[in-house]
Every structure is written in structure tokens, then in C-alpha cells.
Image (tube, rainbow, N blue to C red):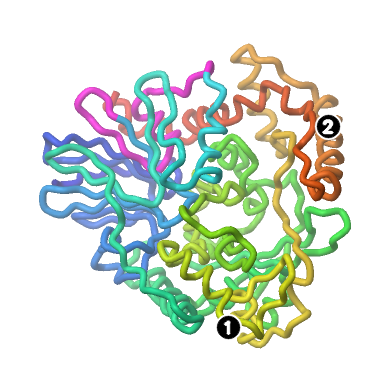
């Protein structure tokens, strides 16, 4: 199959939408301006192989997405994480496949249904059930739209079907085998990111806090050539102090820029809400990502893979706090989740935490991550200087409502046009304060007693049910207009 490309000026940098048919030899692809492409492939991503060969369909470690043509088959490659996905649907004789939902809605003329209020819970199933057992379709004004995590899609003369990524992950029986794998993987990703054949330069950045996962991730990211870090000063808790990782950047020889967690400064906030209809990774939106493109190293999921007390992984689950899907396409970011490297052997990685050789790095507390601790202390950071207590800088709030002025105006306008009730400014502020206090009480008292959450009045706001629909329709109209998409409808 041959691919036919059309760059769409004004589209998000890394977005693409394809129209294909198993009965035709040519697959049409609309794409943003910073998508890399050759005669037989298109990619927005970084993987553990030679860039010029374009063999991202032959690996299980890629961060980003791509399309690869080989003979009479076409492979649509998804990211090797639980925080990015492919979207696709079947209309008449054509398949539409995309790495962007609002882009797919735009070129097909479809809309999300205003009478369906379960979009967010559908997306949340990737964290509750896992990347393979999650709900894999959502309703639209036409056919259902399918979504896919981790695995690839293959188009052949027999139609479109899901396919597992090649299994290239080695076994991990000791800390050394795993540690060597992490270092070598970082080196390969760095070589790919800095390949001479790329049209657009990729710089690197790591998110850094005072906790286990991000510091261990920074140590690993150095092997890729990463020398820059970003950190948020404030912890989400009122009494746990600063969560800044700036001092660890100094110890690792990295430059670090620290940020105040100013909720009014969220960038492209609508795109964050489009991921799942919830706050997700809004705190990541305040970072100044290197331009034109950035490989961003994250320690997400370390609380599962590297935690000695975590439940055993039967099926990897997506992380809702790092769903940057549409945001990263606009900003030009590849989200590289280090604890997801080798996720197919997650149980083996978890078992390393319990090996006798890990005893010197085991604390026996409820905040105990021997693998991460050994990585950090081996890098020269002394015990007692990091991970003293569990903190976070997440932007989650029990009351789901945007914070930046632009996003608030957009949501209010959407609700008004649709005829939905628009909460007043006073109502929102009052409920936000009330929700925060009740959440703090629950987290620090009632939850520890094993009690379930009590009555939560903010759950009664119907507007929270429309956040996913709002954000995706807003992006469809503001980011995916023009181009040649009209002729596809």
C-alpha cells in the first residue's frame, strides 16, 4: 500500500488522520507540520532503533505514533504506554484512523453525543481495568469510535485488525539485568532522538521532584543525553512542604527550572480536558518545553512498578494524571514514561524488589521502592536527602472545573449554547473550597479507617458530565479547520 501525504497548515504539530480502504492501494493522510515522513512511513515519535530505517513497527518501545507501509499491509503504530492511544472508525467503505480525536471528528464530520454522559467514565476504565480490558469504544453522532492502547492496527486486504507489538523485552532476573536494560534503552532513545536524518530537532526534558520515581527517572534520562529538568515547587498538600527537585538536578549535573503551581497559568488547558474530561496532567502544562520538539521523561507508574508494596501487575493500567494526548500534539512533546519500559515483564521487575540482593535498599515502610532507591543512591545521592515522605504536585480536584481564563470562557460559552445550566463564579469558588476541605479530611482520617467516600455534592453538577464533549468539540473547531479535510466528508 502507498501513502499519500497532505500537510495541514495550522493543525497541531504532531497530529495525523488517515483515510484508508482495504480495497484501495493508496492511503490518504492529513498531518501537522512537524510529523516526520519518508516514502513508506510517517512518524511522530522516538523509539529504540535507527531513525533512518523507520522500523518503529518492529519494536515494543516507541513513544509517539506512526504509520508504516510494507508491501500490501499498513501498520498504524501506537505508543508503548497507557497514556496515549489511537482512534478509529469505519464509515461506508473507508476506515479513518488518527492519533487525535478532535481531528478525527473534524475530517469525518462526526460529533460526540450531547445526550451521552459517560465519556469520562469510559476513558477512566483504562486505569480501573487496564489497557486491554478497558472500554474500547465510545458513541458518536454516527458509528462508534474505537480506541486502542499499546497494540498496533494492521490494514491488509482482509480489513483492519488489532495486532500485538513485537516482543523484544528481555527477561529480568536480577537488578543488574534490569538496570543495564534501562541504561541501554536510554542510550538508544537518545540516539534516535538526535538522529541527523530528522528534519526537526528534538531536545530533552525530565520532570523532577523530591520523590523516588522522578529522581530515578532523571538518573536514567542522563544516559539518553538529557541535561534539563523542570520542577514544581509546591506540594499539593498544605503541610508537606516543597516537592521541588531542583537540588537533585544540581547533584546530577542538570539545569533545572522551577515553577510555581499557578493554576491560572495552565497552557492549552482545553487540550488537557480533551484527554478524559478531567484535569489529568494540567500541572505539566506550565512547563516550558524545549522547541521545536521535546522528548519528556516521566516517572509515572513508578508507584506501581518500583514500589515494593504495590499489588502484582496482571495487566498494565493507564495513568489518568499523565493523559497529555491532545496537549502534547499541540506542544510538540513525546511523553516517555520510563517505568513503562519493559512493561511486558512487569511482574519480573516487581519481583526484583523482593530479591535478597535488594535488602540494603529496602526500608520496610509503606513508602518503599528498592529499585528506584538503588538507582538513585548508586548515582551518588545520599540516603535521607530524598523520598523522605510521599508528596505530589498533581492538579486534581474533586470539583472538575477549568482554571485558566480562556478555558473557563470556552466552557461557559459551550454550556450556554447547548442550553445547559452554567454555574456562577461564586458557586464554583464555594464548591471548590468545600470539596478541597472534605477531600483533605477524607484522605487523612476516614480513608485510613477503610470507610468509603461520603456524600459529595459537587458530583451533582451536571456540567462535569460534558467536559469531554466540550473540550473535544472546542479543539475540533479551533484547531482542525481548513486543510483539505472537507473533501473527505
Give left or right: position of 25 versus 96. left
Residue 440 in sight from this viewpoint: yes
Q: Which residue is mark 2?
A: 429
Residue 294 in sight from this viewpoint: no
**Residue at the spot 34% in from the left edge and 44% down from the top edge:** 31
Magenta residues, as a range?
90-115
**Of residues 181 and 191, which is closer to you in this image?**
181
Q: Nearer the viewer, mark 2 or mark 1?
A: 1
Q: Crowdedness of circle 2 by 10 Å Cα count: few (<14), some, many (20+)?
A: few
Position of 431 relative to 333 (above/below): above
Residue 407 appears in which quarter of the rendering?
Answer: top right
Specify the quadrant that holds the C terminus. top left
**Residue at the spot 79% in from the left edge and 22% down from the top edge:** 424
Q: Is residue 400 magenta?
A: no
Q: Crowdedness of circle 1 by 10 Å Cα count: few (<14), some, many (20+)?
A: few
Q: Position of residue 357 (x, y in %)?
A: 57, 85
Q: Which secondary structure, mark 1?
A: helix
Position of 421 relative to 400 (above/below): above
Q: Which secondary structure, mark 2?
A: helix
Q: Which residue is mark 1?
A: 356
Amino acid at each position: 500500500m502507498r501513502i499519500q501525504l497532505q500537510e495541514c497548515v495550522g493543525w497541531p504539530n504532531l497530529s495525523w488522520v488517515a483515510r484508508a480502504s482495504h480495497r484501495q492501494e493508496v492511503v490518504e493522510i492529513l498531518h501537522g507540520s512537524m510529523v516526520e515522513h519518508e516514502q513508506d512511513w510517517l512518524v511522530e515519535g522516538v523509539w529504540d532503533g535507527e531513525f533512518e530505517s523507520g522500523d518503529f513497527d518492529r519494536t515494543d518501545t516507541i513513544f509517539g505514533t506512526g504509520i508504516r507501509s510494507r508491501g500490501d499491509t499498513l501498520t498504524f503504530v501506537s505508543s508503548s504506554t497507557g497514556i496515549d492511544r489511537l482512534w478509529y472508525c469505519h464509515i461506508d467503505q473507508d476506515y479513518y484512523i488518527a492519533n487525535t480525536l478532535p481531528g478525527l471528528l473534524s475530517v469525518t464530520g462526526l460529533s460526540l453525543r450531547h445526550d451521552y454522559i459517560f465519556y469520562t467514565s469510559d476513558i477512566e476504565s483504562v486505569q480501573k481495568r487496564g489497557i486491554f480490558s478497558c472500554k474500547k469504544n465510545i458513541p458518536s453522532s454516527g458509528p462508534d469510535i474505537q480506541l486502542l492502547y499499546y497494540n498496533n492496527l494492521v490494514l491488509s486486504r482482509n480489513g483492519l485488525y488489532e495486532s500485538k507489538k513485537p516482543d523484544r523485552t528481555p527477561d529480568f532476573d536480577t537488578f543488574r539485568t534490569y538496570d543495564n536494560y534501562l541504561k541501554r534503552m536510554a542510550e538508544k532513545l537518545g540516539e534516535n532522538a538526535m538522529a541527523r536524518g530528522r528534519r526537526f530537532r528534538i531536545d530533552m526534558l525530565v520532570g523532577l521532584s523530591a520523590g523516588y520515581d522522578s529522581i530515578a527517572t532523571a538518573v536514567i534520562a542522563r544516559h539518553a543525553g538529557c541535561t534539563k529538568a523542570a520542577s514544581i515547587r509546591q506540594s499539593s498538600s498544605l503541610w508537606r512542604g516543597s516537592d521541588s527537585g531542583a537540588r537533585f538536578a544540581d547533584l546530577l549535573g542538570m539545569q533545572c527550572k522551577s515553577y510555581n503551581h499557578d493554576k491560572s497559568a495552565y497552557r492549552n488547558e482545553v487540550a488537557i480536558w480533551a484527554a478524559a474530561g478531567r484535569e489529568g496532567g494540567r500541572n505539566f502544562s506550565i512547563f516550558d518545553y524545549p522547541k521545536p520538539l521535546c522528548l519528556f521523561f516521566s516517572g509515572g507508574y513508578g508507584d506501581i512498578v518500583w514500589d515494593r508494596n504495590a499489588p502484582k501487575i496482571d495487566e498494565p493500567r493507564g495513568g489518568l494524571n499523565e493523559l497529555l494526548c491532545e496537549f502534547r500534539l499541540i506542544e510538540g512533546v513525546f511523553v516517555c514514561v520510563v517505568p513503562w519500559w519493559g512493561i511486558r515483564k512487569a511482574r519480573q521487575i516487581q519481583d526484583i524488589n523482593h530479591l535478597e540482593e535488594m535488602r540494603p535498599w529496602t526500608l520496610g515502610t509503606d513508602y518503599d521502592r528498592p529499585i528506584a532507591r538503588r538507582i538513585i543512591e548508586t548515582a551518588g545521592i545520599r540516603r535521607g536527602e530524598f523520598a523522605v515522605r510521599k508528596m505530589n504536585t498533581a492538579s486534581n480536584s474533586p470539583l472538575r472545573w477549568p482554571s485558566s481564563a480562556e478555558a473557563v470562557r470556552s466552557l461557559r460559552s459551550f454550556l450556554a449554547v447547548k442550553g445547559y445550566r452554567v454555574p456562577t463564579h461564586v458557586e464554583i469558588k464555594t464548591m471548590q473550597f468545600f470539596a478541597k476541605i472534605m477531600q483533605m479530611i477524607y484522605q487523612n482520617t476516614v480513608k485510613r479507617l477503610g470507610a468509603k467516600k461520603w456524600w459529595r455534592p459537587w458530583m451533582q453538577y451536571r456540567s462535569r458530565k460534558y467536559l469531554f464533549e466540550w473540550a473535544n468539540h472546542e479543539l475540533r473547531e479551533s484547531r482542525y479547520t481548513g486543510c483539505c479535510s472537507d473533501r473527505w466528508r
